[in-house]
Amino acid sequence: MTTGMTRTTIRLAAAGTVAGTVLATALAGGTALAETGGPGGTGETGRTAAGIPKNFLLHEPRARKPVRYPGEETWTISDRLGANLGINPCGLRRPADRDRVAMRSVDYQAPEHHSGEQLVIYRSTAAARRALAGLLGQVERCARVKSEGTVTKTWADPVRAGDRAVRITLQGYDAKGVRPAVGGQRAVVVREGRAVAVYVLAGEYGKVRGSDFTRQLKDARKMAAKVCSLRGVC
């Protein structure tokens, strides 16, 4: 939780009780990255999304290299405009935001671990604002969900990055919603100009700690600065 900032408690739908289910939610409801990929993934296409140069995303160069442990880890890259955002609070089958002009998703999957990076460029700054507002509205609609004897809670806290940024926590609890269960998602979403970037980790989280977001926040701040090098984005 960020000191001195107003905490926005929000709702997030989740299915399942353990890390494996959370990972499935992150993949099926989030990045949808299995279509194209680098050498460690499902096949390189060599395409570039309009307005996003090749290797522009922070983890993209690594994703294009062979993996160290084939069969246990996978990098995938997709330019699909219709992919859901990497954090998908209500488990939408298709994205609710509009006016995307370019998008790239980079995903890493290993046993009991998932990380994702996305950059979405919108037609206007207003469209990017609406996209972030819609994501927070989606989280608000799905704040506390019971499923198979567990309770999933999700909330967002503002953080300092770009024009506006939030960190989103998804955490499973026992049936009473008191004791943290194993599994969770930790995301930072930042808007800069007409771009929105998403950084998410999913794994065997338990009690929520500020350090859970260190890597995502660092990456979000770096991308918020970098994206302004693209003409017309900022």
Image (spheres, helix red, strand yellow):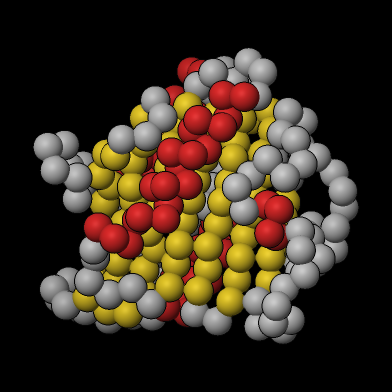
Q: Is residue 105 left or right of residue 164?
A: right
Residue at position x 13%, y 73% from top? 178
Residue at position x 54%, y 47% from top? 85
Residue at position x 53%, y 68% from top? 114
Task: Name the residue nearer the viewer: 92 or 84.
Answer: 84
Task: Name the residue nearer the viewer: 119 or 62.
Answer: 62
26 w.r.t. 48: above or below: below
Q: Is residue 174 left or right of residue 71?
A: left
Q: Is residue 170 left or right of residue 99?
A: left
85 w.r.t. 72: above or below: above
Question: Is residue 73 in sight in this rendering?
Answer: yes
The part of the image, by quadrant, that contains residue 5 is top left
Q: Position of residue 16 (x, y in %)?
A: 40, 75
110 w.r.t. 188: above or below: below
Residue at position x 32%, y 79% from top? 182
Q: Is residue 69 left or right of residue 218?
A: right
The part of the image, by quadrant, that contains residue 163 is top left
Question: Is residue 141 in sight in this rendering?
Answer: no
